Image (tube, rainbow, N blue to C red):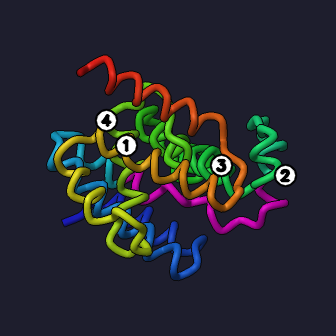
Amino acid sequence: MMNEKLAKMQKKVKKYLDEDRYQHTLGVMYTAGALAMCHGIHIEKALTAGLLHDCAKCIPPEKKIKICRKNHILISEVEYANPGLLHAKLGAHFAEKKYHITDADILCAIRCHTTGRPAMSELDKVIYIADYIEPGRIELPNMAAVRKLAFQNLDACVIRILEDSLIYLESRNIPLDPLTEQTYRYYKELEENSK
């Protein structure tokens, strides 16, 4: 049974999300919990980060920018061009201020769940992966292989998702957040050095 604190948070999160986003959020939360169990990571932290990862997603783009400015949250050029990316930074801010999360691991996992980051913690990887593979996600190419990999090797799975994301963004001419590229290079180098 989910603990009371998490159940209360879930009710609150539901108010701020549309139905599709809420269903996605539940999918990410439970997938994060399953990955945490599989890889020996703190389950409650994974469930909490999964539940709150998109808590700022349904805010209109202009309002996201306004809230970031008001709270001195840095906005990059890419984020100004694509304010949807701000929901991760803003989500970490809301997790702290609205949901009273003080755990730095959870806040970091929320903050980097869209772009990834070099040297991610195991929890960061779990949320990044769960967001991509949760059962309700549109079947992307290679999804079955990525889902299987998630339960075998987190680093290899992160690389696979980054590769697929870079190809997707390039093919759609969507501006790439430099952090995504840095993350990819970091993990590719790690992979090369371990061979």
The residue type indicated by label 4 comes to: Glu
Q: Judge depth for marks 4 and 3 and give the one in front.
A: 4
**Marked residue nearer the N-terminal end (2 or 1):** 2
How far separated are the C-alphas under marks 2 and 1?
A: 32 Å
The residue type indicated by label 2 comes to: Lys
**Marked residue nearer the N-terminal end (4 or 3):** 3
The answer to whether 2 is drawn above or below residue 179 in the figure is below
Indicate which disc residue 90 carries.
Answer: 3
**Marked residue nearer the N-terminal end (1 or 3):** 3
Tag 2 secondary structure: helix
Can you identify the residue that label 4 sits on? 122
**Marked residue nearer the N-terminal end (3 or 2):** 2
**Marked residue nearer the N-terminal end (4 or 2):** 2
- Dot 1 crowding, Cα within 10 Å, few <14, some 14–19, many 20+: many
How far separated are the C-alphas under marks 3 and 2?
A: 11 Å
Q: Position of residue 23 (x, y in %)?
A: 43, 76
Can you identify the residue that label 2 sits on? 66
Residue in front for this viewpoint, 158 or 104: 158
Quarter assignment of residue 192: top left
Q: Residue at x 56, y 58 (%)?
A: 168
The residue type indicated by label 3 comes to: Leu
Can you identify the residue that label 1 sits on? 158
Magenta-colored span: 48-65
